[in-house]
Image (cartoon, rainbow, N blue to C red):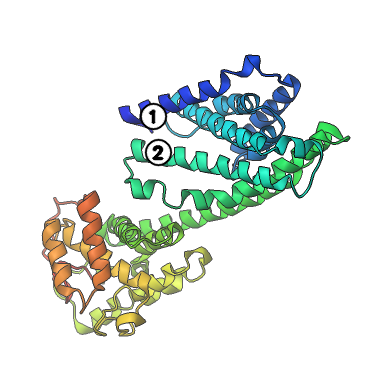
Amino acid sequence: MEATPARARAYVACVALCALACLLPLPATPTPWWAVVLLAALYAAGEQIAARRRFAGTFYPVLLAGAFLLPPPAAALVAVPGALIAPVGGRPRRLRRVWRAAQLVVAVWAAARVHGALGGRDAVVASDFPYALAPAGAAVLTFCLVLTALDGGILKLSERVPGRRAWRGLFLRSLAPIAVHGLAGLMMAVLWRSPYGSVAALLVLLPMCVSWWVFAQYHRERAAHQSTIRALVQAVDIKDGYTRGHSERVGQASMMIARELGLADERVEVLRFAGILHDVGKLGVPTRLLRKNGPLTPEERQVIELHPEYGHEMVRGISFLGEARAAVLHHHERLDGTGYPYGLMGGQIPESARVVAVADAFDAMTSTRSYSRARPVSVALRELEKCAGSQFDPRMVTALARAVDQYGWHPAVTADEACTAPARPPVAGVPGAHR
């Protein structure tokens, strides 16, 4: 939302007005204000701690406990202070805070309304299990639906994400963690209404804090892996200046193909890593061969063709890469069996490698380098289509063509055009493809 379009601002304003409408009945609603203040302070403190300690997730159990304990307007108010003072990333900060507060107010209000309409509040007071689970489950489902519906809307309007992608997977990804938070919130509410009181209810947050800490460690480890990946890619870019930036763009094209194929978001991310790392094995190839002007000898080409195996050795210990490791090893295989390093044919070639092969060749043809000028995108796509079935998987070529047609492609210069190195010949197969 850094350069927020007017329609996104209007959307935020509409959600904020809905949030105000949810809070308007508050003065006429019998409200246990001490409980509202305590829960609001707890939520605000929790959000501050989570941001500073970089815990994963947010303190939804407190908000959902409020939805199970309080009237809807009062439950919605619990979210406001914490959302307005919580740290946010990116600008405009004020708009982001307003958006977050309004979104949570509407979601908590809706959850509390559903919970109350199903008799959940009485069940909580009476500790009536398992009956209390049904209204609580419906409230959690409502909370998740509202959040994901609003999130998809802001993605579509602020970042111009196509409608079918804006909401895809949001609900399913959110449901499991929010369901866990809902159970914790229900435990808090039941203990709060028990003879042990609010102090006992707060103890429920201790195991939740432990789980947040564990998730924070996981994300730190993942960030460390990503830093390693960036360092490897930068090393390749420094060693082979002719293809500077190529890896990042192959990652982007691989992600576009994966999304067009309808793959799960987790696989889309893995394929982005595969594209970024596909040439990391060049670190094991002598620099003089990578920068050689003129044709390679058969012996030199054999050395160059070892780079997929070098790359696979380098990344096979990075566990979260998954199938990206197979793409690094096999992205130069061809459907007709004439590729390298193992001469695999057709379906023997991993799907991830077939995606990266198309992305790799496409960027090689559409990028301007000091030894070759970029081909127009339409020409590059026609070349890929000519080789579909023999060199490339036709599904991947078609997916890339659809994605480029819908979102466009913006290739970049990958080396200083002021350099006047003699032209190097392309590899066999697609014209313009690099070694």
Residue at 52% x, 21% y is 21
Give the CA separation, mark 1 to mark 2. 8 Å
Classify residue 392 by image quadrant: bottom left
Q: Nearer the viewer, residue 53 or 139?
A: 139
Q: Secondary structure at mark 1?
A: helix
Drawn side of residue 241 relative to residue 124, left or right: left
Count how many numbered circles sit on residues in the image: 2
Q: Is residue 374 visible?
A: no
Quarter of the picture holding the N terminus: top left
Which mark identifies residue 271?
none
Drawn side of residue 233 relative to residue 316, left or right: left
Q: Is residue 378 visible?
A: yes
Q: Nearer the viewer, residue 333 or 382?
A: 382
Residue 303 placement (x, y as % from top left)? 29, 79
Q: Residues within 10 Å of mark 2 (few under 14, many from 20)?
A: many
Q: Residues within 10 Å of mark 1 (few under 14, many from 20)?
A: some
Drawn side of residue 317 relative to residue 50, left or right: left
Earlier-in-chain disc, 1 versus 2: 1
Instruction: Please state which amino acid type lies under the numbered disc 2.
Output: Gly
Which mark identifies residue 11?
1
Residue at 88% x, 34% y is 195
Q: Is residue 234 above or below residue 5?
A: below
Residue that badge 2 annotates: 153
Residue 386 placement (x, y as % from top left)? 14, 72
Q: Secondary structure at mark 2?
A: helix
Residue at 36% x, 26% y is 10
Residue sticking out furthest to the front:
118
Residue 406 placement (x, y as % from top left)? 23, 51
Q: Nearer the viewer, residue 29 or 391?
A: 29
Residue 38 placement (x, y as % from top left)? 73, 26
Query: Are the two marked residues, 1 and 2, in contact with CB atoms closer than 8 angstroms?
Result: yes
Instruction: Please state which amino acid type lies under the numbered disc 1.
Output: Tyr
